[in-house]
Image (cartoon, rainbow, N blue to C red):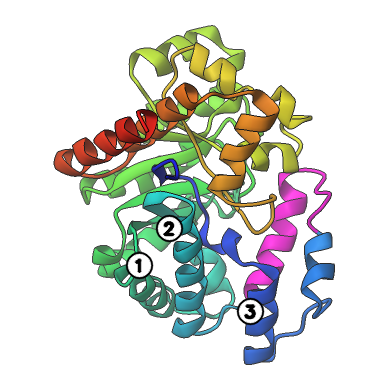
C-alpha cells in the first residue's frame, strides 16, 4: 500500500520528461539541442541556481503547441502521480509562457482540462503569474483568464523570486480574491523571510510554496505555526537548485519538529530527480523519516488541499489506515 498524498506544488511544465520532449519536438517540427533523451536529461544534472533551471525549462516549452500536446503532458503526469499514491493534485500552469510562444489560453486550458477530466485522481489547476514579468502583466493575464474561470481554482506566483517581491502583485491577488479564487505564492525559496511575510500580508495567500527561508525568522515561524499556514516543501528541488547543499541537510525534519504544516511535493519532477515518490524515498533513506513522520506529512497534505470536508475526512482515514497497516 503506497502512502496516500495530495501533491500541492507541481508545475505541469516541469513534468515534461525528455522522451515526451523529443516526441513533441518531432511532432511539431521544433528544433532541440539534442534528440537523445539521455543526453537531454544529463543536462539537468547541475543547475547553478533557480535561474539556470528556469532558462532550460522555458526553452523546452517551445515544443508545446497544440491541445493534444498539453493533454499528453498532463495525462502522463497524472498516470505517474496516481501510481505514486497521489489522490489529489493541485497543478500549477504558466499561461504567460505559452502566450509568449504564441499559444492561446484556450489551447492550454482545453488540453490540460481534458486530461484532468479523465484523470485517475482528483485534480485542479492553479494559474501562476510569472513574477519577473511584473504586476501589470499579472493583472492583464488574470483578466484574460477570467473567461476560462471554470478551468482553474486559484492563482499562484512563480519564476525568478529575488527582486520581484510579493507586493508587486497585490492588485492581481485582490482581483483573484474578489473572484473567489484560492491564493498561493512561491516565497522563501531564494528570497528571504520578508518575501514570506509579504505574501501573507499583501497577497492574503492560504499556503506558501517552499517557505524554507522562513526558518531564519523565529517570529515568522511562530506565526506560520499558530495560523497553521501550510508550506509546500520540495526536497529534491531544493537540492537540485542549491538552496540546500545536500539532501541530508534538508530542513524538513526541523520544520516538522517546529509543528509547521509542511507537505512534501516534487515541484518539477522531470528536472529534479523524480516524482513525489522519489521525494518520499529520499526523506526515508537520507533523513531517516519514519512512517509516523510520513503519515504526518500525508495528513498535512490533505489538511492543506483545496478539497471539501467529506473528501478531507475520507483521505485522512486513508492515511490512518496506511499508518496502521
Ligand atoms: O521551482 C520553481 N521556482 C520558481 N518558479 C518555478 N517555475 C517552475 N518551477 C519553479
Ligand atoms: Zn515551484
Residue labelled with disc 3? 63
Residue labelled with disc 2? 82
Name the dominant secondary structure of the magenta segment: helix
User: Height in image: 116 above or below 8?
Assistant: below
- Image quarter in which the N terminus is found: top left
Label 1 close to label 2 by CB (< 8 Å): yes
**What distance separates the C-alpha of mark 3 from that of mark 1?**
23 Å
Image location (x, y in percent) of residue 125: 37, 58
Disc 2, SS: helix
Residue 119 badge? 1
User: Height in image: 259 above or below 121?
Assistant: above
Image location (x, y in percent) of residue 162: 66, 37
**Location of residue 146 by image quarter:** bottom left
Q: Is residue 201 left or right of residue 21?
A: left
Tell me which numbered mark, 2 or 3, is placed earlier along the sequence: 3
Foreground label between 3 and 1: 1
Disc 3, SS: helix
Magenta stretch: give its range: 44-62
Name the residue rendered at 63%, 22% in the picture. 251
User: Height in image: 19 above or below 279?
Assistant: below
Disc 1, SS: loop
**Observer-nearest residue: 47 or 191?**
47
- Image quarter in which the C terminus is found: top left
Q: How many marks are shown on the rendered structure?
A: 3
Amino acid at each position: 500500500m503506497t502512502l496516500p498524498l495530495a501533491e500541492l506544488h507541481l508545475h505541469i511544465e516541469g513534468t515534461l520528461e525528455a522522451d515526451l520532449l523529443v516526441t513533441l519536438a518531432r511532432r511539431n517540427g521544433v528544433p532541440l539541442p539534442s534528440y537523445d533523451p539521455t543526453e537531454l536529461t544529463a543536462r539537468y544534472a547541475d543547475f547553478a541556481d533557480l535561474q539556470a533551471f528556469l532558462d532550460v525549462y522555458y526553452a523546452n516549452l517551445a515544443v508545446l503547441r497544440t491541445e493534444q500536446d498539453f493533454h499528453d503532458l498532463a495525462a502522463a503526469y497524472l498516470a505517474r502521480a496516481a501510481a505514486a499514491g497521489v489522490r489529489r493534485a493541485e497543478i500549477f500552469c504558466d499561461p504567460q509562457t505559452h502566450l509568449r510562444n504564441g499559444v492561446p489560453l484556450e489551447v492550454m486550458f482545453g488540453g490540460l482540462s481534458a486530461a484532468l477530466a479523465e484523470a485517475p485522481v482528483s485534480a485542479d489547476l492553479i494559474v501562476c503569474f510569472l513574477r519577473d514579468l511584473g504586476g501589470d502583466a499579472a493583472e492583464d493575464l488574470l483578466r484574460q483568464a477570467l473567461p476560462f474561470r471554470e478551468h482553474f481554482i486559484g492563482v499562484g506566483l512563480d519564476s525568478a523570486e529575488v527582486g520581484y517581491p510579493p507586493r508587486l502583485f497585490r492588485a492581481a491577488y485582490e482581483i483573484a480574491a474578489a473572484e473567489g479564487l484560492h491564493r498561493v505564492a512561491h516565497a522563501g525559496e531564494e528570497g528571504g523571510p520578508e518575501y514570506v511575510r509579504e505574501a501573507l500580508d499583501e497577497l492574503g495567500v492560504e499556503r506558501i510554496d517552499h517557505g524554507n527561508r522562513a526558518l531564519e525568522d523565529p517570529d515568522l515561524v511562530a506565526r506560520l505555526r499558530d495560523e497553521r499556514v501550510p508550506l509546500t516543501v520540495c526536497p529534491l528541488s531544493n537540492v537540485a537548485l542549491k538552496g540546500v547543499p545536500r539532501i541530508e541537510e534538508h530542513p524538513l525534519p526541523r520544520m516538522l519538529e517546529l509543528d509547521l504544516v509542511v507537505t512534501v511535493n516534487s515541484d518539477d519532477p522531470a528536472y529534479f530527480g523524480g516524482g513525489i515518490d522519489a521525494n518520499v524515498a529520499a526523506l526515508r533513506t537520507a533523513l531517516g523519516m519514519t512512517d509516523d513522520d510520513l503519515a504526518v506529512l500525508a495528513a498535512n497534505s490533505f489538511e492543506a488541499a483545496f478539497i471539501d470536508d467529506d473528501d478531507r475526512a475520507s483521505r485522512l482515514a486513508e492515511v490512518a489506515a496506511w499508518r496502521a497497516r
